[in-house]
Image (cartoon, rainbow, N blue to C red):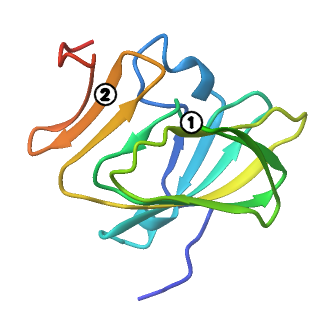
Amino acid sequence: MKKKIDLATAPKVAGTLYPPPFDAPCRARRRIKLGDAAGLTQFGVNLCTLKPGAASSQRHWHENEDEFVLVLDGEVILKEDGGETVLKKGDAAGWKAGVPNGHTLINRTQRDALVLEVGSRAAAETARYPDIDMLCVRDGNGTRYTKKNGEPF
């Protein structure tokens, strides 16, 4: 079995599954799903390209999954509960599951930014979005976005 991942044929995802209008900041986000291409099941790995003006996500935190990012090229703004931090090539950040520190990466430059994303894959997960009325719930019934009161979009 080949171990080298062919970036040209690896699964790709453009934009986001967020419901409107929450999808707007992430429409210019592109991901190559390296972990899926390798058949990984315990953690995910993505090569994320953020076009100028794009965000990696809405600001969020995970109840059950750790996250880690490494900037491979360009510059992004890490926006967290405590404020904003510039991350440049070679800078990294991580978030422990269950710690309510909403975070996102935003490309405010005029060129693409390339970020390696790594996250655990819990069987059940809830992602919380402190700035907007949205939750993402993944369980035995699949993945769905709801309002914070559980009402579907």
Label 2 – label 1 distance at C-alpha = 17 Å
Q: Picture quarter containing residue 83?
A: top right
Q: Is residue 93 left or right of residue 113?
A: left
User: Judging from the image, what secondary structure is the residue with disc 2 in?
Assistant: strand
User: Judging from the image, what secondary structure is the residue with disc 1 in?
Assistant: loop
What percent of the width, then of the height, locates residue 35? Answer: 45, 66
What percent of the width, then of the height, locates residue 113? Answer: 78, 47
What percent of the width, then of the height, locates residue 30? Answer: 61, 42
Q: Is residue 123 left or right of residue 62?
A: left
Q: Residue at x 43, y 73 (%)?
A: 38
Characterize the local packing of mark 2: few (<14), some (14-19) or many (20 or more) Cα atoms within 10 angstroms: many
| Most foreground residue, 25 or 47 | 25
Asked whether disc 2 touches disc 1, contact meaning CB atoms under 8 Å apart, the reply is no
Mark identifier at residue 135: 2
Q: Residue at x 9, y 45 (%)?
A: 140
| Most foreground residue, 31 or 75 | 75
Q: Is residue 130 visible?
A: yes
Where is 69 relative to 16, above or below? below
**Amino acid type assigned to the residue bearing label 2 in the image:** Leu
**Amino acid type assigned to the residue bearing label 1 in the image:** Asp
In the picture, the quarter occupied by the C terminus is: top left
Characterize the local packing of mark 1: few (<14), some (14-19) or many (20 or more) Cα atoms within 10 angstroms: few
Mark identifier at residue 81: 1
Q: Earlier in the sequence, mark 2 or mark 1?
A: 1
In the picture, the quarter occupied by the N terminus is: bottom left
Q: Residue at x 55, y 40 (%)?
A: 103
Count of all numbered marks drawn on residues in the image: 2
Q: Is residue 100 left or right of residue 57?
A: left
What percent of the width, then of the height, locates residue 7? Answer: 62, 64
Instruction: State which mark lies toward you, 2 or 1.
Output: 1
